[in-house]
Image (spheres, rainbow, N blue to C red):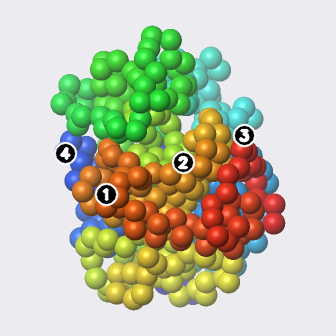
Amino acid sequence: MTDKRPNILLYTTDQQRGDHISISGHPVIETPNVDSFVNRGAYFPNAYTEIPSTTGARRCLHAGQGSYDCGLVGYAAAEWNEPNILAQVLADNGYHCINVGWRNMHPRRKLFGFHNVICHDLHEGEDDYWDWLKEKLGPEVLERGHGCDANGWLTRPWHLEERYHPTNWTNDVSIDQLKKRDPTRPFFIWVSHLRPHSPYDPPQFFWDMYINRELPEIPVGDWASEHDIPGPGLDMTAWRGRLTPEQNQRMRAAYMGLCSHLDYDLGRLMQEMQRSLGVMNNTMVIFTSDHGDMMGDHHLHRKTYAYEGSARIPFVVRYPAGLNLPTGTFEHVVGLQDVMPTILDAIGIDIPDSVTGKSVLKAVKGEEWRKFIHGEHSPCYSADEAMHYLTDGREKYIYFPKSGDEQFFDMRENRLELHNLVGKSEFEERVSLWRKRLIKILGDRGDGFSDGEKLLRKDSWSAIVSK
C-alpha cells in the first residue's frame, strides 16, 4: 500500500543573503519561483543563521538545534554523531531519504540517515559532480577552470556550456533520483546547492541580467573605517578591504545572477515534479540558506559576521496539499534550528527531545513564539571579529569577546546597520536589556563568556564545543 503522507523537498543554497530574493524588497533581483511560495505558504523576512558559516549552520539545520547545542560554534571539519538527525528520523518513520549536491558534513561520505547520497563536495575522489564533469568533457576540465577562487571576490561568466554548471547538475541528478525512488513511500530530498557561494560564475544569460544594471549603493557604517583597506594588493580571498567600483559591480552582478539561476532551476525542478512525476501538489518545500555573504558591505567579504549580509538568510515555506494554514509574510524571528521541527510537525512525527528549534507552523497559527534568537561564531579570519549576537529582527546586539566591544543597531530605522548606537544616551536602556539577555544565556552555558553578572572577555576558543 502506498503511503500518502506529504513528501518533503528541502532546497538549500550556500551563502545566499536574506535580502537576495525579490520578495524581500530588493529593488533589482528576480526570484519569481521562490516568491510564489507566499501564495501557498509563508515567508519569514526575519530569518537568521545561528552560526554564519557552513559546517555549524548545517548542524543547526539537520539536528534542529541552536548554536552550542549542536556541538559546534564555528567552522571545523569535526565528526558529527548526533543520533536524531533529520534524515535518520524520517527514514526511521518510513521516508525514502535522498541527498544530492553540496554537503560539507563530516565525515564527508557519512550517510547521516540518507539512503542515497550523490555529492558535490570539492574533494578529489569524493565529488560525484567532478567525476561526472571529467567523464563528460575530459580529465583536464575543472569546475574552477575559469580562475576564480571558491572563497574569492573575482568573478566572470561560467566558462562552459550552461548544462555543465553545478547548479544544473544538482537539479538534473535530483530529478533522476526522484524518478528512481521507492514509489510506495513518501520521500525526503535535500537538494543542496553550492552557489551563490563563490566562485561567482553564473551562466552568460544570468550574468547579462545584471551586469549593466544600476545596483543599490553598498552600505558602509560609520563604525567600519578599520575595514577600509584599499587596493590594489587585496588577496582574492580577502575577508575585508575596499574593491574598485568596477570590481564591486562585477562581483555583485554575478552574485545576483547566481541567485536568479538557482531560482529558475528550482522552477525547472518543480515543473518536472509536477508534469513528469505528479508529486508537486503533495510536497512541502522549504527554501533557505546556511548563511549570507557580505558582498562588500562595510568593506567586509565572505561570512562569519553578525551583520545582516552574513547572518540574515532567506526562509520560505510552501505548504503541501491538505495543510490549510494562513499564508503570507510573517515577522517572527526564525532560524535554521526551526527547519527540522517544522517538517516533523507538518507530517505528524514526534519531535525528539534533543531539538531546540520550533515549528514555524506554530508561528503562522499565532501561537506563542520566541522573542529573539542567539547566534555566534568562534574565531575564523580574525579573533577580533568572533562574536555573539542577539536579534528579534527589529534590534540587534553584538558582543565581541576578544575586545569586549559592543554594537547595537535599530533596524527599524535602518536595516543597513550604518550607525552603532552603543554609547548614545537615548539607547542605554535598550543596550542594557540586550546585554542582560546575553549574560543570562552565556552564564547558563558556563564556558567562560559570562559569570552570570557580566560578560567576560576571551582571546580565543575552539569551534568545537567541549561540554
Q: CA distance from mark 3 to mark 4?
A: 40 Å
The residue carrying pointer 4 sits among few (fewer than 14), some (14 to 19) or many (20 or more) residues within 10 Å by Cα, namely: some
Residue type highlighted by circle 2: Asp
- The answer to which quarter of the image holds residue 445 is bottom right
Residue type highlighted by circle 3: Glu
The quadrant the C terminus occupies is bottom right
| Label 3 vs label 4, nearer the camera | 4
Which residue appears at 31% of the width and 31% of the height? Answer: 253
84 vs 409: above or below: below
Residue bearing the label numbered 2: 405
Q: Which mark is residue 179?
A: none
Which residue appears at 25% of the width and 73% of the height? Answer: 328
- SS class, disc 1: loop
Q: Which mark is residue 126?
A: 3
Which residue appears at 40% of the width and 62% of the height? Answer: 428
Residue bearing the label numbered 1: 411
